[in-house]
């Protein structure tokens, strides 16, 4: 039996009552919850709903105004305590991986000293350092990019193993220091200026991000039951979307042949990961159980369930109306968040790291806003890479991260994820893409182009 | 161990039905045996090294079926897995090994002198002969579950043991992570080099973790005796040569194995073995002798005969392509080997191969002359 205690003295407002749960449920800390000011309505409050909607929780007693003590009984006897014991047969020096031929962020920062310090620790879920780094040990390097080389199994991974994650985050996110800096979140699409691209060049516009459900382990570590619960929570919320966002869920285990073909034709269907970066981290376990695709009837708002993250949220359309794409993106995300909160769930987020996702490269906004754009002349100009760099943009092939460009059509998107808000990043993409189009037009007319000044970053 | 599924106590927060895998589209031994009742009974257990039921079955959950063979769909993480999870392993073993019961005892016979014949297989048909088995070192977790430290300890001990061999067994160890380009070329040319597994059956069980750390190949100077370290098992031991002298291949196999075992015993780390399951290996399909004795043999006409499969079954043999378990045959050349592993001894299994291949070569010759072979086909399973 685990008891929490929230004492309220006579006259004290219940607003912003801090409640902390002791024991194995610590990871679901309900701090900074807001309560209605009428203490007697506690049972009806969102707080009680949050408690009662979780598995096997009953509320023993509730005392009225003046002081309130609520205890709750957890039915299951077996729980892992925070920091479960890790099985250790050999000293850290015998277990330290051989990273001499490796080139990824994990290998750059995992010294024997850091390994020795962290190898005995585990998150409350039992996730260990060896599990976090396995993908980086198994995959020494990638031809196109310096990979991160480690993943999180749950929200606490980023805290328990901060001695490794913090420097990796700093390297990967261009100097963002999670120990000192705060990440801004801003999903107010009305702040966007311009954002309608010349469709002679821009073929399509897209914004994607990911969201994790607080309290459930992430894809590298989740059990089948947890993954199924993610699916239930998410499709329940998506079922509440209306208007232009109303849509339908297609479970990977149950879709018909016709549905599958349609999803392929729409370029919506995701398949079992083949990249060893993902499979070595355990993200393809139990495939295709509890995986699926949801999209709205208009096919402009799409959610992947239980692929590389709990959810991947995508807003897209043909053509150059990035403003509308982002507006729908923000609206959809905020609606989904409201709908899961009604049921007592929330997204993983904190002010140090922003939205918490499986891969450290997607922390912060987790946002990649981009266009498919043809730039036949500019792409051949030797200044193209430098221009992109200064605009804080990156290019990929139109097949995604592991592909090269075909012809002169590129995927151009923001480089940064963490340290700037969604609005800031999308504005960067809009301004940058407009600049690229200007360059292309100038080259068409035989005029010269200029490398723009480097955009200043948070550092 | 490899993935987050192993935090057993936390998982028990969820009900049995919530965690039970969806096996409705599966066709492997594990899926046929695993019921909700068995899952409920075993899910809170773990071996002394912390291996759990979900670890055991992960490869079978991730790989619903195989085009050529009925896969096992479960693996052991350590010696105790077969005990702790016997409610799952016993029926799987029974299915896979022709009705072998939980109370049966397995006979081990590595006395090569007990083999009759085997030195006269026609080299015009039998291109090469090979016997392989696996061995696990007692006291260490198996490839699906071992940590880097454990795997390195297995390598160190194995290399020490192998390097102390002499005479026809004198040889050298080539660690995968530090072999030179020239050495690698030579090992490829000799068909000795094994590579990182690509089969999802192995990857899903976590056997390729930390590749190529602590993996390597040892072989004798004559290139007739070969040991793989830390691939799918702690050790895979292979004796081979061109031509049809299976007797000699088996002699060298037995002598080498016995020598190696003595050395490990001196270090207080003998091989995993018990009288019910014989030699304990990672995959239940390799329990017992873990032995696959076989030949590459030219049977273009016999393989076209309508009764080819039946003949193989009656002779207790199986066919594969010359590329190994996941391949088809090329140009009428087949890999023919014993089908059994558990319930009969090494000598008995190699005897099956010797007698059966001899008979099949006779059949091939008859077919070449346009004669019928019905009189040669055995009336029932031997």
Image (spheres, coloured by chain):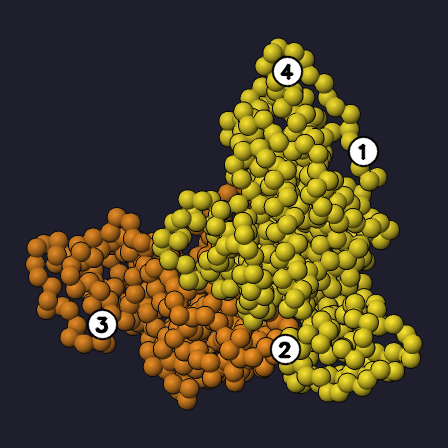
Chain in yellow (letter): A
Q: Residues within 10 Å of mark 4 (few under 14, many from 20)?
A: some
- What is the number of callouts on the image? 4
CA gap, disc 4 and disc 3: 80 Å
Disc 4 with disc 2 on a shared chain? yes
Assess whether mark 3 and mark 2 are in contact (beta carbons under 8 angstroms): no
Q: Which residue is mark 1?
A: A456
Mark 1 or mark 2, earlier in chain: 2
Report whether A359 appears left or right of A261: right
Q: Could you classify mark 1 by the number of other residues whose Cα lies within 10 Å: few (under 14), some (14-19), or many (20 or more)?
A: few
Instruction: Identify residue for label 3.
Output: B314
Q: Residue at x 11, y 63 (%)?
A: B373
Disc 2 versus disc 3: distance between alpha carbons? 56 Å
- Tell me the SS state at disc 1: loop
Q: Quadrant of residue A377?
A: top right
Label 2 marks which chain's residue?
Answer: A
Look at the image and give the colour of chain B: orange
Q: What residue did someone put label 4 on? A: A442
In the picture, which quadrant includes the C terminus of chain A? top right
Q: Position of residue B107 (x, y in %)?
A: 40, 82
The N terminus of chain A, quarter of image: bottom right
* Residue name at image x 52 percent, y 83 percent: B40
- Give the x, y percent position of residue A297: 48, 50
On residue A55, which mark appears?
Answer: 2
Give whichever of discs 4 and 1 has the lower sequence position: 4
Instruction: Choose mark 4 or mark 1, whichever is in front.
Output: 4
- Element type at marker 3? helix
Question: In the structure shown, which secondary structural element does the residue marked by tag 4 occupy?
Answer: helix
Who is closer to the viewer here, B308 or A423?
A: A423
Residue A459 can be seen in this image: yes
């Amino acid at each position: 039996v685990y008891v929490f205690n929230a004492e309220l003295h006579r006259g004290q407002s219940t607003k912003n009552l801090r409640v902390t749960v002791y024991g194995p449920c610590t990871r679901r800390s309900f701090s900074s919850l807001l309560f209605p000011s009428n203490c007697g309505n506690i049972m009806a409050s969102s707080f009680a709903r949050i408690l009662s909607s979780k598995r096997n929780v009953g509320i023993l007693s509730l005392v009225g105004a003046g002081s309130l003590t609520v205890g709750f009984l957890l039915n299951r006897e077996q729980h892992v305590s925070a920091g479960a014991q890790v099985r250790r047969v050999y000293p850290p020096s015998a277990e330290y991986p051989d990273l001499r031929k490796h080139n990824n962020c994990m290998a750059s920062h995992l010294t024997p000293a850091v390994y020795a310090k962290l190898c005995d620790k585990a998150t409350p879920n039992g996730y260990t350092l060896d599990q976090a780094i396995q993908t980086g040990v198994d995959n020494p390097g990638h031809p196109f990019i310096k990979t991160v080389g480690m993943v999180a199994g749950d929200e606490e991974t980023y805290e328990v193993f901060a001695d490794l994650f913090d420097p990796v985050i700093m390297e990967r996110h261009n100097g963002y220091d999670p120990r000192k800096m705060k990440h801004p979140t801003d999903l107010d699409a009305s702040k966007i200026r311009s954002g309608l691209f010349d469709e002679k060049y821009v073929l399509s516009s897209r914004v994607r991000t990911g969201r994790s459900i607080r309290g459930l382990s992430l894809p590298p570590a989740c059990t089948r039951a947890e993954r199924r619960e993610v699916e239930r929570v998410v499709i329940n919320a998506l079922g509440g979307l209306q208007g232009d966002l109303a849509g339908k869920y297609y479970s990977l285990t149950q879709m018909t042949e016709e549905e599958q073909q349609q999803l392929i034709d729409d370029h919506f269907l995701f398949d079992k990961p083949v990249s060893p970066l993902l499979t070595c981290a355990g993200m393809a376990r139990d495939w295709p159980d509890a995986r699926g695709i949801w999209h709205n009837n208009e096919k402009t708002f799409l959610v992947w369930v239980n692929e590389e993250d709990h959810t991947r949220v995508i807003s897209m359309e043909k053509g150059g109306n990035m403003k509308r794409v982002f507006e729908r993106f923000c609206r959809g995300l905020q609606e989904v968040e409201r709908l899961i909160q009604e049921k007592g769930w929330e997204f993983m987020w904190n002010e140090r790291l922003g939205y918490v996702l499986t891969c450290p490269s997607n922390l912060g906004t987790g946002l990649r806003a981009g266009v498919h754009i043809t730039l036949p002349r500019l792409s051949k100009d030797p200044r193209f890479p430098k221009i992109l760099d200064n605009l804080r943009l990156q290019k990929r092939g139109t097949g995604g991260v592991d592909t090269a460009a075909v012809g002169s059509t590129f995927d151009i998107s923001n480089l940064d994820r963490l340290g700037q808000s969604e609005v800031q990043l999308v504005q960067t993409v809009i301004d940058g893409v407009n600049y690229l189009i200007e360059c292309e037009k100038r080259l068409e007319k035989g005029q010269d182009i200029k490398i723009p000044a480097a955009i200043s970053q948070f550092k | 161990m490899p993935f987050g599924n192993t935090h057993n106590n936390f998982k028990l927060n969820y009900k049995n039905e919530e965690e039970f895998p969806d096996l409705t589209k599966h066709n492997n031994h594990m899926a046929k045996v695993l019921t909700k009742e068995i899952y409920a009974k075993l899910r809170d257990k773990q071996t002394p090294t912390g291996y759990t039921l979900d670890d055991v079955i992960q490869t079978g959950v991730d790989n619903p079926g195989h085009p050529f063979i009925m896969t096992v769909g479960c693996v052991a993480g350590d010696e105790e897995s077969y005990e702790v999870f016997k409610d799952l392993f016993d029926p799987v073993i029974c299915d896979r090994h022709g009705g072998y019961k939980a109370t049966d005892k397995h006979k081990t016979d590595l006395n090569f002198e007990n083999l009759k014949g085997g030195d006269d297989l026609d080299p015009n048909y039998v291109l090469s002969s090979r016997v392989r088995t696996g061995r696990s070192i007692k006291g260490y977790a198996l490839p699906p579950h071992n940590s880097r430290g454990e795997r390195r300890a297995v390598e160190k001990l194995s290399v020490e043991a192998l390097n102390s061999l002499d005479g026809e067994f004198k040889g050298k160890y080539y660690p995968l992570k530090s072999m030179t380009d020239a050495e690698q070329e030579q090992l490829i040319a000799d068909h000795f080099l094994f590579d990182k597994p690509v089969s999802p059956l192995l990857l899903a069980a976590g056997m390729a973790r930390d590749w190529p750390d602590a993996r390597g190949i040892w072989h004798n100077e004559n290139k007739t005796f070969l040991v793989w370290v830390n691939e799918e098992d702690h050790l895979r031991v292979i004796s081979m040569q061109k031509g049809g002298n299976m007797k000699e291949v088996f002699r060298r196999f037995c002598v080498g194995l016995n020598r190696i075992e003595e050395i490990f015993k001196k270090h207080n780390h003998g091989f995993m073995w018990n009288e019910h399951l014989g030699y304990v290996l990672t995959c239940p399909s390799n329990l017992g002798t873990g032995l696959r004795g076989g030949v590459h043999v030219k049977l273009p006409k016999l393989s076209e005969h309508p009764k080819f499969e039946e003949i193989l079954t009656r002779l207790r043999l199986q066919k594969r392509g010359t590329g190994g378990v996941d391949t088809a045959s090329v140009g009428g050349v087949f890999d023919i080997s014993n089908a059994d592993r558990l319930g009969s001894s090494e000598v008995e299994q190699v005897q099956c191969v010797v007698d059966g291949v001899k008979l099949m070569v006779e059949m091939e010759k008859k077919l070449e002359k346009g004669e019928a072979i019905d009189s040669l086909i055995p009336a029932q399973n031997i």
